[in-house]
Amino acid sequence: MKPDLARWPRPSVAVDVALLTVRPPGELAVLVHRRADGYGKGKWSLPGTFVHEGETLQDAALRALLAKVGVAGERPEQLRVFDTPGRDDRGWVLSVAHADLVPYERLVSVLSDDRVLARIDGEVADAGGLLFDHDAIVAEAVSWARVEYSARPDPMGLLDREFTLLELQRLHEAVAGVSLPKDSWRRFMTDAERRWLEETGDFQRGSVGKPARLFRRVAPTRL
Amino acid sequence: MKPDLARWPRPSVAVDVALLTVRPPGELAVLVHRRADGYGKGKWSLPGTFVHEGETLQDAALRALLAKVGVAGERPEQLRVFDTPGRDDRGWVLSVAHADLVPYERLVSVLSDDRVLARIDGEVADAGGLLFDHDAIVAEAVSWARVEYSARPDPMGLLDREFTLLELQRLHEAVAGVSLPKDSWRRFMTDAERRWLEETGDFQRGSVGKPARLFRRVAPTRL
DNA sequence: ACAATAGTGTCTATCAGACAATATCCT
DNA sequence: AGGATATTGTCTGATAGACACTATTGT
């Protein structure tokens, strides 16, 4: 005996994704797009979509990334539900916010007049902010990334290849938005007990000064 | 021109609340109820309900607490959305999990044969676990409470009256599930820089041994 | 006086930050 | 050699945990 759930009013449930990246020479940015059609046409917003039946929230987030900004192969994480009444004046719409942080190179090819990276320094919005409550979602996504990056080296795997400690430090500084003390930060990251990094044995070539050791990650990029 | 959101299939959205408490002499427990009617009748579950239109998730959580377990005046916090396909075999149902931690005294009066506190020590379930994925929700609620209580004194305000440091420590030990070092824990909590606690000037009366100072919280109970 | 609990002093190990010395490359 | 960058050594201050000592009550 299954009660008929459909008799009760149900909300529309959207997912919205704050896809962050670190753009050279080291600034945090978020991918936004100008809405091509439907509601809010012409306005800037995060990629998002309504959740379909039989689909997980993460699947919906992936579908939104592919359809709205042409990005594939990411793994967005759920932040929380945004449910302020009136956040979407089409009606009763909840948004499950997601975030991910991905290599800049993977986004370059999708950029266009309608798909741009917006710098984040205190405020996201270049011109008047994003649609709905997307500015708040971006702010939470940045907090999320900063917490992740304060605990271990490059948990989102932005550095796939081998890297020097300076490169890793610059990445962490870009995410954190502050500079980090060279020596103690380095000792923290390379502490032998933690087994986060291992030396490849090779050195960076062709640079001025003493060549830097190359490292690779040992710890998994996610939990 | 508002598109008709109702044309698309929409999920049912529920809220479920893991209402935690610390029961004398100091064990963490969660309030569960036996479902009186409808789906899952007779089974144990967390208090929950479907979200109504025009209502925030928090309001829905409060309504569920009142209707299902007769508890009022709490302030549940959102954990995350549980969306595993098939988690509810009535159909397409998302659950926004919430958690709160409240004084035991406020729950005593609502307890009955069908509303009980289930101890938490590794596993919640006394008899075969809770309905749906509610065991997982309880686990996340416990993690949430432990994170909150590791950072500052009694953030949920379980000790409203004045208290001794030993009482505060026992509370934190109950939440954490481990014992805490008396001296260093005390120094951490009473550190003058942090201004978390202040002495009332009074002392505990009528106990054996040296009377303990009484403290009250200075820091706000939540963010 | 004695039992019992509260509160403090002190030692040690660890760690972050600051600072500076040393190492090793390139031109 | 001289400039530039990497890497390591060392000092200091803060802090947690361990341990033990002192303080203050009730009986």
Image (tube, coloured by chain):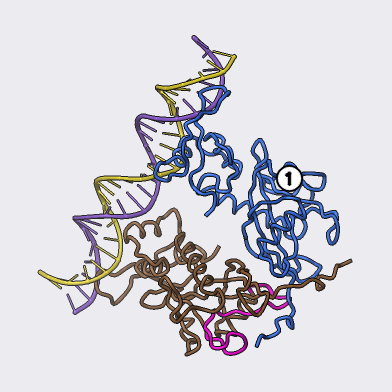
Chain colours: A brown, B blue, C purple, D yellow
Q: Position of residue B131 (x, y in %)?
A: 77, 57
Q: Residues within 10 Å of mark 1 (few under 14, many from 20)?
A: many
Name above or below for residue B71 compared with residue A171: above
What residue span does the magenta drawing correspond to? A34-58
In the image, residue A48 lies in the stretch drawn in magenta: yes
Name above or below for residue D15 compared with residue B84: above
The secondary structure type at the circle numbered 1 is strand
Q: Residue at x 74, y 49 (%)?
A: B125
**Residue C17 horizontal side relative to residue B80, left or right:** left
Q: Position of residue B165 (x, y in %)?
A: 52, 35
On the image, numbered disc 1 is attached to which residue?
A: B117
**Residue B159 horizontal side relative to residue A22, left or right:** right
Q: The N terminus of chain B is located in which quarter?
A: bottom right
Quarter occupied by residue B8: bottom right
Q: Amino acid at mark 1?
A: Leu
Q: Give the overall secondary structure of the magenta segment.
A: loop
Q: Position of residue A37 (x, y in %)?
A: 60, 89
- Report the front residue among A124 and D12: A124
Name above or below for residue A203 compared with residue B172: below
Which chain does the numbered disc 1 sit on? B
- Report the front residue among B215 and A144: B215
Q: Residue at x 66, y 58 (%)?
A: B98
